[in-house]
Image (cartoon, rainbow, N blue to C red):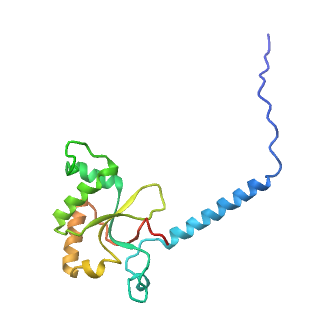
């Protein structure tokens, strides 16, 4: 009976220590992870807008926060599909997730009877693209915020349209430079 020996490629043993460059890279990654964790912690959605984020004469440039209902791009795309919405400029072209915002927003504005609704990309720590169907931001709330009863009606209509019971919150604008 013949025996065969399998020869596996020889590997050089792993180095006992990392190089200086590898150590620096590792430290840099850890520092970046801590920075990202701190950013996520600081940018959690808020139920109420703190005074320090209101636009005032004393604080004319706070970070931008949007008040509204959170949705993923995929959820907005599914909304356009459910209602067979088309882009107004290209009704013959099927929609895909990247271009579903305009028809979604147009319908939501009509259904909620609120011409100033917008959809804003917001900060999200995960892989998904999150957007807020926005009633106003901390910069536009003085001019766009309606009465409490009207706001409740608009929110209920948006929730009904989007099939959610999620309450509106304040979300950090994704493009915030701070």
The residue located at (62%, 63%) in the rendering is 32
Residue 95, relative to residue 32: is it above or below?
Answer: above
The residue located at (52%, 71%) in the rendering is 41
Query: In the image, 150: left or right of 29?
Result: left
How far across and how far down the image is residue 56, in percent?
Answer: 38, 87
Residue 11, relative to residue 96: is it above or below?
Answer: above
The residue located at (70%, 57%) in the rendering is 26
Residue 148, relative to residue 94: is it above or below?
Answer: below
Residue farthest toward the top in the current orientation of the protein: 1
Q: Nearer the viewer, residue 56 or 73?
A: 56
Residue 140, relative to residue 26: is it above or below?
Answer: below
Q: Quadrant of residue 28?
A: bottom right
How far across and how far down the image is residue 87, in percent?
Answer: 23, 50
Query: In the image, 32: left or right of 139?
Result: right
How far across and how far down the image is residue 161, in percent?
Answer: 21, 60
Task: Give the quadrant of the N terminus.
Answer: top right
The image shows a total of numbered marks equal to 0
Query: In the image, 123: left or right of 32?
Result: left
Q: Quadrant of residue 7?
A: top right
Query: In the image, 148: left or right of 59?
Result: left
The residue located at (61%, 66%) in the rendering is 34
Q: Nearer the viewer, residue 20 or 157?
A: 20
Q: Quadrant of residue 123?
A: bottom left
């Amino acid at each position: 009976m013949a025996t065969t020996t399998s020869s596996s490629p020889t590997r050089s043993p792993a180095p006992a220590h990392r190089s200086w460059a590898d150590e620096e890279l590792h430290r840099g990654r850890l520092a970046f992870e801590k920075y990202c964790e701190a950013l996520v912690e600081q940018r959690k959605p808020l139920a109420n807008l703190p005074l320090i984020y209101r636009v005032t004469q004393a604080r004319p440039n706070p970070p931008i926060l949007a008040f509204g209902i959170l949705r993923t791009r995929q959820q907005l795309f599914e909304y356009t599909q459910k209602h067979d919405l088309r882009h107004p400029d290209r009704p013959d072209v099927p929609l895909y997730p990247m271009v579903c915002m305009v028809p979604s927003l147009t319908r939501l504005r009509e259904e909620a009877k609120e011409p100033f609704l917008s959809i804003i990309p917001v900060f999200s720590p995960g892989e998904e693209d999150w957007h807020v169907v926005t009633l106003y931001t901390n910069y536009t709330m003085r001019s766009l915020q309606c009465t409490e009863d009207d706001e409740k009606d608009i929110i209920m209509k948006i929730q009904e349209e989007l099939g959610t019971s999620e309450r509106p919150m304040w979300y950090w604008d994704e493009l915030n430079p701070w």
